[in-house]
Amino acid sequence: MPEQGICSSLKEPRLVARKFLARPQREGVGAVVRRSIGRFELKYFDPFLVLDEFLVSAPAGFPDHPHRGFETVTYMLQGAITHEDFEGHKGTIEAGDLQWMTAGRGIVHSEMPAAQGIQKGLQLWINLASNDKMIEPRYQEMLSKDIAEVVEGGIKVRVIAGEALGTKSPIQTRTPTMYLDFSLKPGAHLQQPIPKSWNAFAYVLEGEGLFGNTKSQPVSSHHILLLGSGDGLEVWNRSSNKVLRFVLVGGQPLGEPVAQFGPFVMNTQEEIDQTIDDFENCVNGFEKARHWKSEAAISLDF
């Protein structure tokens, strides 16, 4: 099969440094996640705290819970999830839609199934620098039809954050980040630049491909690949009939200490202790949590 693709003349392609299979585990209330970052082998991949591929069907879900000190990025692959928070923000994200939530100083919210059957998506947690941890919460939401999409040389990319194939995303990231959803047809070859100072990984959603060099072993779905140093990534789809789909994510390392207690991520244990106290007493960003309960929680009596 003749090779097709985009060439960007990488000088130092990144190789795969580590590879993990994300195995299913229980999370939330009855939900199943495949966690690849934030597990015991990989607690933190600066600036990334968690990567979950989640599957959930009603009445299971992620009822009322808090966050402070980082961003959550929810990208729906199938079905729909309704989000609701104590600021009165409520909405539903469907397949292909994106929600980029900056929790900052504090948010309490719920994420529950909004359709029949299985809801599937990715949720990425991105750490915030110390001087951004106590900013006001913010949302950036994009419908699937508004996410920039480019098709060229057997490659389709959805540009969620950053830039690919000459197209930039309008999403503003506090921590410099790229988030690209690639689909490669059989025979396609990709060369995607990545800033040399950034950490980066790929997570395979469908099919299998060669990552880093043509002598590597094919990698299939549910695997995360941590990339070594270099100026970009090369990927080949050598399948005769299956599309390879994966997300490529990169970010500027913060190089700061990390203190974490569940959904709270700060820089010191003292700040974590203060956060727990703030949440329990509904102060310093959590004032509205005192009398708030999501509609989902009320209806399910959580």
Image (spheres, rainbow, N blue to C red):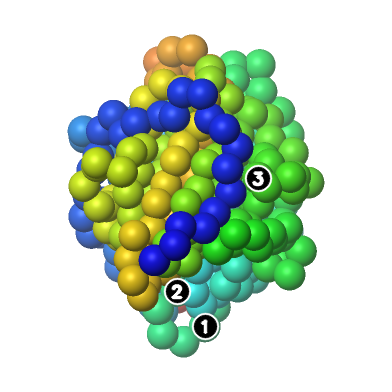
- Tell me if label 1 and label 3 are in contact, CB under 8 Å: no
Residue positioned 31% across, 43% down in the render: 214
Q: Is residue 110 above or below residue 282?
A: below
Image quadrant of residue 45?
top left
* Residue 93 pos. (x, y %): 62, 68
* Residue 36 pos. (x, y %): 31, 45
Disc 2 marks which residue? Answer: 119
Q: Nearer the viewer, residue 24 or 77?
A: 77
Say which element carries label 1: loop
Disc 1 marks which residue? Answer: 115
Q: Nearer the viewer, residue 132 or 86?
A: 132
Give amino acid for label 1.
Ala
Disc 3 marks which residue? Answer: 164
Give amino acid for label 2.
Gln
- Separation (CA) of disc 3 from disc 2: 28 Å
- Separation (CA) of disc 2 from disc 1: 7 Å
Residue 253: tell me if it is visible. yes
Q: Earlier in the sequence, mark 3 or mark 2?
A: 2
Q: Earlier in the sequence, mark 1 or mark 3?
A: 1
Q: Residue furthest front?
A: 2
